[in-house]
Amino acid sequence: MGVCERSTETSRTLYNTQLFITPNGVLAAKHQKLVPTHAERVVHAPGMRRHALACIDTPWGRLGGLICGEHSNTLARFALIAMKERFHIGSWPANFSAGHARAMYETKNINARAHSLEENLVVINAAGVLNDKIKAMLCDSEGKAAICESNGGGSAIVGPGAEYLARPLAGEEQILYAEVDLNAFDERSLMRDITGHYQRADVFHLTVTCEDTPLLMVIGANQKEAIPVTQEARSSVDPSSDKSQIKNT
């Protein structure tokens, strides 16, 4: 599920986020888009390192995902492949910019088929759709109407080998279904497995950093002097003493 996530640390920061929810309603993981694309930077902050990648276990194999333009980030895609991703969720908006509706529609599934072909996995593309009512609400000027020149869409399911299991939808809401032969993963990997026999880790390897850097780190002997005094700490100071101690809080 794609959401606009508000930070728990400050109400002024938003993230472009994918949620991975189990059939019984438990939040299993979340992925935040690491680098907002183009105009998204006006709204969204870069994702946190600890939410850089999400790849969870399911009864049918590991499930991961990326958001929109992240599919052009080869390192992000390879990291998920190396985490043994077998099912991939691609989250996409309806449109992106004026005059590029067709290109956006095709880009969604070019990326899906490329990722599928690279590691013989299943890609489920979920693309946004704008109905006429929503377009009327959003497009209150000619400039905005140019961006929403189509209703978007492009959802599809791509199987191992990059063949369509459910062909792309154009500008309509619908639930897509497909059957997948789980044996096809291993059969195709006998020829080419880029995280196994068809790879050379002694030549190529990838390091992923998923530990966030704290906003504030005070290092040295003067930590107490450097940290701002809280109201509670101020109340513990005896104004009658020249050597008042600040209570640890």
Image (tube, grey):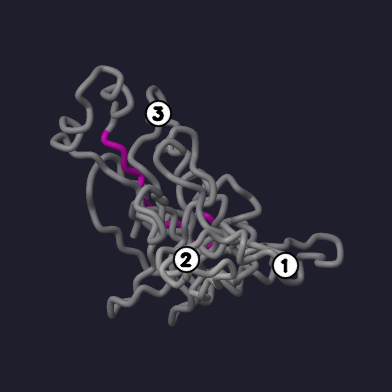
Which residue is depicted at the point 76% across and 65% down?
198
Q: Is residue 215 left or right of residue 237?
A: right
Residue 222 rendering spot, x and y as whole percentages = 68, 64
Q: Is residue 198 above or below residue 154?
A: below
Q: Marks 3 and 2, how far apart in space? A: 62 Å
Q: Marks 2 and 1, how far apart in space? A: 25 Å
Q: Is there a contact, CB below 8 Å, between mark 2 and mark 1?
A: no
Residue farthest to the right, as pictured: 202
Which residue is depicted at the point 55% across and 65% down?
50
The residue at which mark 1 appears reads as 221
Which residue is depicted at the point 39% across and 49% down?
14
Residue 115 rendering spot, x and y as whole percentages = 56, 54
Query: Which of labels 3 and 2 is toward the front?
Result: 2
Residue 247 rendering spot, x and y as whole percentages = 51, 75
Question: What number is the disc on residue 97?
Answer: 3
Query: What amino acid is found at the position of numbered circle 2 in the picture?
Result: Pro
Q: Is residue 155 magenta?
A: yes
Q: Marks 1 and 3, how far apart in space? A: 53 Å
For label 3, count other residues whose C-alpha is less than 10 Å away and answer few (under 14), some (14-19) or many (20+): some
For label 2, count other residues whose C-alpha is less than 10 Å away and answer few (under 14), some (14-19) or many (20+): few
Which residue is depicted at the point 82% across and 65% down?
200
Residue farthest to the top, as pictured: 142
Which quadrant: the N terminus? Answer: bottom left
Most common secondary structure along the magenta stretch: loop
Query: What amino acid is found at the position of numbered circle 1 in the picture?
Result: Ala
The residue at which mark 2 appears reads as 239
Q: Secondary structure at mark 1?
A: loop
Query: What amino acid is found at the position of numbered circle 3 in the picture?
Result: Ser
Query: Which of labels 1 and 3 is toward the front?
Result: 1
Q: Of callouts 3 and 2, which one flags the residue occurring earlier in the amino acid sequence? A: 3
